[in-house]
Image (cartoon, grey):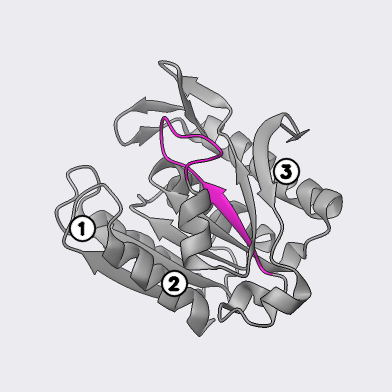
C-alpha cells in the first residue's frame, strides 16, 4: 500500500484517453476526486461511490490517521458533534499538504481536485475549503456539519460545493446544514443544498444528485 505523508491510501488513475473520450463526466479530462470516509471507514470505502459519481475521474482515497476506539477518523472530537478545533486545524493542513504531494507523485492536476466526503470526511473537507481553499476546486459534502465559524471568510469564488443533507438525520440538524451553506455562500462559493428524506446514511438520491452536480460542472 503506498504512503505519502504517512497516509495509507489508494490512488486509481482516470481511464485511458480513448476511454475518457467516451466518458460523460466532467472529470474525464483530468479531474480527481479526493475521497474522505466517515468514522470507522478506510481508504476502500468510497471508491465505488467515486466511480458512480465520476466514471472519468482519478480517485485519491486516504485513510484517516486518528483512531477513536480503534476506528479511523480524520481528526479528533471531544464528544458527538464537538470537535477538537486545534486538532482539526492541524489535520486539515496535513491533509491539504498530502493532496499537493500526491499531485506531484501521481501526476494529476492539483487545481482540479474535488473532495467527496461523508460525515467525518465531509467535515474535514469543509475545513479544507475554509482553511486551504487553494487545495480544492470544489466539494461534495455528504452529511456534513459546520466544522467551525471562520473569523475571516476565505475567498471561495469559483468553487462549487454540493451539501447533501438528510431531513431525518439524527446527528446533523437541518439548521446546521443550512448554516454551512450560508457560510460557504458568504465566502463566494456556488453552493447547491440537496435534501434527502433519509438520515445519517447515504442513499441512491444522494449519488444521483452528486453525479448530476459533477456533470453540470
- Segment colored magenta: 31-45
**Which of 131/112 is in front?**
112
The residue singled out by tag 2 in the image is: 211
Q: Nearer the viewer, mark 3 or mark 2?
A: 2
Q: CA distance from mark 1 to mark 2?
A: 23 Å
Q: Residue at x 69, y 75 (%)?
A: 19
The residue singled out by tag 3 in the image is: 98
Q: SS class of the residue under badge 3? A: helix
Q: Earlier in the sequence, mark 3 or mark 2?
A: 3
Q: Residue at x 42, y 58 (%)?
A: 141
Q: Reply yes or no: does residue 162 show up in magenta.
A: no
Q: Is residue 21 visible?
A: yes
Percent coordinates x, y for residue 28 in the rendering: 66, 75
Q: Nearer the viewer, mark 3 or mark 1?
A: 3
Residue 86 shown left or right of residue 123 in the figure: right
The residue singled out by tag 1 in the image is: 174
Percent coordinates x, y for residue 41 in the rendering: 45, 34
Q: SS class of the residue under badge 2? A: helix
Q: Is residue 137 above or below residue 101?
A: below
**Which of 35/81 is in front?**
35
Give the class, few, some or many, for how many residues have Cα within 10 Å of label 1's Cα (few <14, many ≥20): some
Percent coordinates x, y for residue 165 in the rendering: 28, 59
Secondary structure predominantly adopted by residues drawn in magenta: loop
**Which of 167/93 is in front?**
167
Q: CA distance from mark 3 to mark 1?
A: 32 Å
**Residues at discs 3 and 2 in contact (Cβ within 8 Å):** no
**Residues at discs 3 and 1 in contact (Cβ within 8 Å):** no
Q: CA distance from mark 3 to mark 2?
A: 25 Å
Placement of the N terminus among the 4 image quadrants: top right
Amino acid at each position: 500500500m503506498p504512503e505519502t505523508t504517512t497516509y495509507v491510501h489508494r490512488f486509481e488513475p482516470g481511464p485511458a484517453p480513448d476511454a475518457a473520450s467516451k466518458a460523460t463526466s466532467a472529470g474525464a479530462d483530468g479531474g480527481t476526486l479526493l475521497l474522505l470516509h466517515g468514522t470507522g471507514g478506510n481508504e476502500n470505502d468510497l471508491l465505488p461511490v467515486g466511480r458512480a459519481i465520476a466514471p472519468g475521474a482519478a480517485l485519491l482515497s486516504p485513510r484517516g490517521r486518528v483512531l477513536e476506539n480503534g476506528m479511523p477518523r480524520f481528526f479528533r472530537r471531544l464528544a458527538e458533534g464537538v470537535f477538537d478545533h486545534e486538532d482539526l486545524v492541524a489535520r486539515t493542513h496535513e491533509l491539504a499538504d498530502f493532496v499537493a504531494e500526491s499531485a506531484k507523485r501521481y501526476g494529476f492536476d492539483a487545481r482540479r481536485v474535488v473532495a467527496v466526503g461523508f460525515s467525518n470526511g465531509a467535515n474535514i473537507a469543509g475545513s479544507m475549503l475554509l482553511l486551504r481553499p487553494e487545495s480544492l476546486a470544489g466539494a461534495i459534502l455528504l452529511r456534513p456539519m459546520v466544522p467551525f465559524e471562520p473569523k475571516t471568510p476565505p475567498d471561495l469564488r469559483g468553487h462549487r460545493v454540493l451539501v447533501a443533507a438528510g431531513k431525518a438525520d439524527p446527528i446533523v440538524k437541518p439548521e446546521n446544514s443550512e448554516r454551512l451553506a450560508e457560510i460557504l455562500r458568504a465566502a463566494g462559493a456556488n453552493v447547491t443544498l440537496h435534501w434527502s428524506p433519509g438520515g445519517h446514511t447515504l442513499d441512491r438520491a444522494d449519488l444521483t444528485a452528486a453525479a448530476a452536480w459533477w456533470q453540470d460542472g
